[in-house]
Amino acid sequence: MTIMNFLKAYIEVKKAETLEHQQIQDLQLTRFRKLLRHVLQNSRFYRRYYHEHGISESDINDLTPQNLPVIDKQTVMENYDDVVCDPALKKEALERFIIESPDPATKYKRIYRVLHTSGSSGTVGLFVYGPRDWAIYQALGGRTSQCRINPFKRRKLAFIGATDGHYAGVTGVLEAPRVMFKVMVKSINSPLEEICQDMNRFQPNNLFGYASGVSFLAKEQIAGHINIAPDTIGCVGEPLTPAIRKIIEKAFDVNPMDLYGATETLTFSVECRSHHRLHYFDDWFSVQVVDGDLKCVRPGQPGKIIVTNLFNYTQPLIRYQMDDEIVLSDKPCQCGWPFPVIDKIAGRSEESLWFAKADGNREFIHPSMLGEFFVSGLERFQFVQTETDRLTMKAIIRDDKEEVISAIHERMAKILSRKELSDAVRFEIKLVDHIKNDPKTGKFRLIIPYTGR
């Protein structure tokens, strides 16, 4: 990303903050139709898919997002080489790149940011962003920032989360301008003692990371194991619950901000400073909230998110069904921001897995380390903890099963070793053809902790 790309995108992003609601809706529709024209000209999948639904380029000026059929992660992954708008991007080559070049700062062909996730769905996904796409994401990040910038002194930015792969959070932090920030990233899977030592040594001004990770640090601060004084704290990747907010405020005397996004959307929404209500950016995202029949629900009612990312021209996601559920507010926020308000986000509540070590102490594996689990050929999975020392992965595998199983064991061995749990956890793989949803809730559970029963 050149500085000129960023500045151009940032000016565009900031301008929208002064618009009226109807002006933003008009801007959204203009961007939607421009994106639609692009995909019909450059994506074999969308051209074919929309033709099957009677949609052609001549219809664009009469279409809104609601006129188009829905897709999901499985559809995208099954048709990946045809979905992308650059024919040089191939799923097999991208998977190989992720495995051979795990450093999140590395770009594919020195151009593209490649991100991967399974999220809470257990279905592995690849998402690629080109230079222009990424510039807009970074500009939206500037919209959410509450950093106190001093042009004569670099600030220290610390991140705690998943760091050993091409994940959205760590990749975005590593892209922070070095003229303004000195950056340290810490893996949520590191031993707690190591995390505390490095935080004490670094003394961050800005602290960002998974809500549970920041919560761990807050508890360590209260216990006297660390002594840091960040003036800006942001929580991503998990719900910032009232309990977590309270303990962060107690430990650091800072009111944290809640940021909500996904690998498919990156910066999607953030709390306003005045009222701490979560606003989503409808200038760059078209959103519908739907029920099980894909019919829009009214504000105040929960539903699945159908989103169109209006800035990703490399791997377009149009009318893309996500796994999370949200509740849109029927009341505007008094802060003055023109962007709609999200009252509640459901999902993203996977639990950490705790294991007993040989010395009698307990250690955890954060759900992000399992949600971001990537092995080429692994299509879908679920982790089930059956004892305090036993973990099973239910796995749906394509291609060479023996090779994929070996790669899964190798990947898990690294996770367990990092947490000093190699001798404390018995890990096994169970090959299945289908993974059922929870019979009580009807929803998929990526992680099922041991209940002791």
Image (cartoon, grey):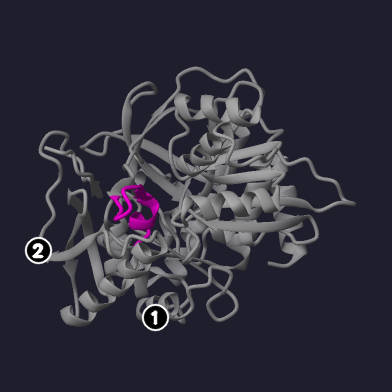
> Which residue is painted at 47% across and 33% down in the image?
240
Decide which of 92, 247 is in the foreground and name it: 247
Q: Which residues are magenta?
A: 356-373
Query: The residue under label 2 is which amino acid type?
Result: Asp
Residue 389's disc is none
Based on the picture, tell me whether residue 406 belongs to the magenta stretch: no
The residue tagged 1 is 96
Q: Disc 1 on helix, strand or loop?
A: helix
Question: Residue 89's image quarter?
Answer: bottom left
> Which residue is painted at 60% across and 37% down in the image?
24
Based on the picture, tell me whether residue 367 belongs to the magenta stretch: yes
Q: Residue furthest front?
A: 359
Image coordinates of residue 110 in percent, x first then y, are 60, 79
Q: From mark 1 to mark 2, how far is it between C-alphas?
A: 25 Å
Which quarter of the rendering shows the N terminus?
Answer: bottom right
Decide which of 49, 184 is in the foreground and name it: 184
Question: Residue 414's image quarter?
Answer: bottom left
The residue tagged 2 is 433
